Amino acid sequence: MQQFSKSLQLMGNRFTITVVADDKDFANENIQAAITEIQRIETLFTTYRPESQTNRINDNAGMEPVKVDAEVFNLIERSMHISTITQGAFDLSYGSIDKSLWNFDQKMTRLPSAETALKMVHLIDYRNIILDAENQTVFLREKGMRIGFGGIGKGYAAEMAKKILVKNQVQSGIINASGDLTAWGFQPNGKPWTIGIANPDAPNNAYSYLEISEKAIATSGNYEKYVTINGKKYSHTIDPKTGLPITGIKSVTVIANNAEFADAMATPIAVMGIKNGLFLVNQIPNLHCIIIDDFNKIYTSKNINLL
């Protein structure tokens, strides 16, 4: 058995697809099948193509419901459930925040005022996403509302790509979407897959390792995207209630059975804060997390076994 991998940009992120197989052609064929599936999902959910279903929903905000594919409807429905259990800390309608408020790709030199930020977030409210299961339509109640799948899309794509590979008899592999990943089976040496949990102050160094075979992992951290203003680091994770970046937490790593759920839970746990985040995680079966605060103190949910 050998390990075969390919990395490429998909959905605006670096995806690495790894399969374990005897035969190189079989491996490459399946890696391509996974890539094709991720590209299909990107076309469905992107906001970068005017004709995507996501944009059709957004363009009709405040006007009329939009009929969508079952796949789109179902993902929105599951997202709404996550919004409910996180009391709005996860919210698809975060797309309403204007890029002019927070643009972590540019050199920001000052924070927007709390008033400006609050004005921008008044359209963020998952309760104004109206679903009609019978007609399979989605309606955004307020004009100017926008939804986006940035908080759940990578995990969903990883999970769907894995499903195709498992169906094609790929016994072992990893789909890694910029650190959000799902793994199954064993390494070529017969050992379970393990990952290093990054040290936020030195992301290339691991402070601990975790066995991840048959599990999914997602990490939300301020060491990848942030701005420093007056010597203080502000995370790219925005609290949808205030429009301002969260502080106090350097990273949240979530372990779940499913990459979609892991991806969707990482950011809201950071938004909810250490105490509330851990409390929520401990209520949900098969969900675990590791939180590192600004002082490098590590907090873990129940039943975490770091190696």
Image (cartoon, helix red, strand yellow):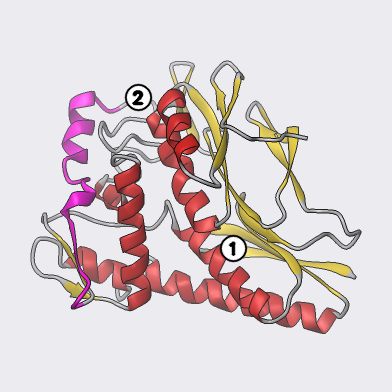
The secondary structure type at the circle numbered 2 is: loop
Residue 98 is labelled as none
Question: Residue visible at 76% across and 72% down?
Answer: 171
Q: Residue at x 57, y 78 (%)?
A: 36
Q: Position of residue 277 (x, y in %)?
A: 44, 32
Task: Work out which quarter of the rendered image holds the N terminus and state it.
Answer: bottom right
Mark 1: which amino acid?
A: Gln
When asked about the image quadrant of residue 24, the answer is bottom right
In the rendered image, the vertical position of residue 294 relative to residue 103, given as above or below = above
- In the rendered image, which residue does mark 1 sit on? 9
> To which residue does mark 2 refer?
110
Taking the magenta stretch, the answer to whether it contains residue 20 is no
Q: Is residue 123 left or right of residue 218?
A: left
Depth check: 64 or 195 in front? Answer: 195
Question: In terms of secondary structure, where does tag 1 sit?
Answer: strand
For this view, does 34 lie left or right of residue 273?
right
Residue depicted at x 35% and y 41%: 86
Q: Quadrant of residue 43?
A: bottom left
The question of residue 121 being in magenta is answered with yes
The residue under label 2 is which amino acid type?
Answer: Arg
Compared across the picture, whether 286 is left or right of 60 comes to right
Residue 291 at x, y percent in the picture: 56, 29
Does label 1 or label 2 sit earlier along the sequence?
Answer: 1
Position of 127 relative to 164 (above/below): above
Q: Is residue 297 visible?
A: yes
* Crowd class of label 1 (few under 14; some 14 to 19; many from 20; radius 10 Å): few
Q: Is residue 105 visible?
A: no
Q: Position of residue 78 (x, y in %)?
A: 36, 59
- Which range is magenta? 112-135
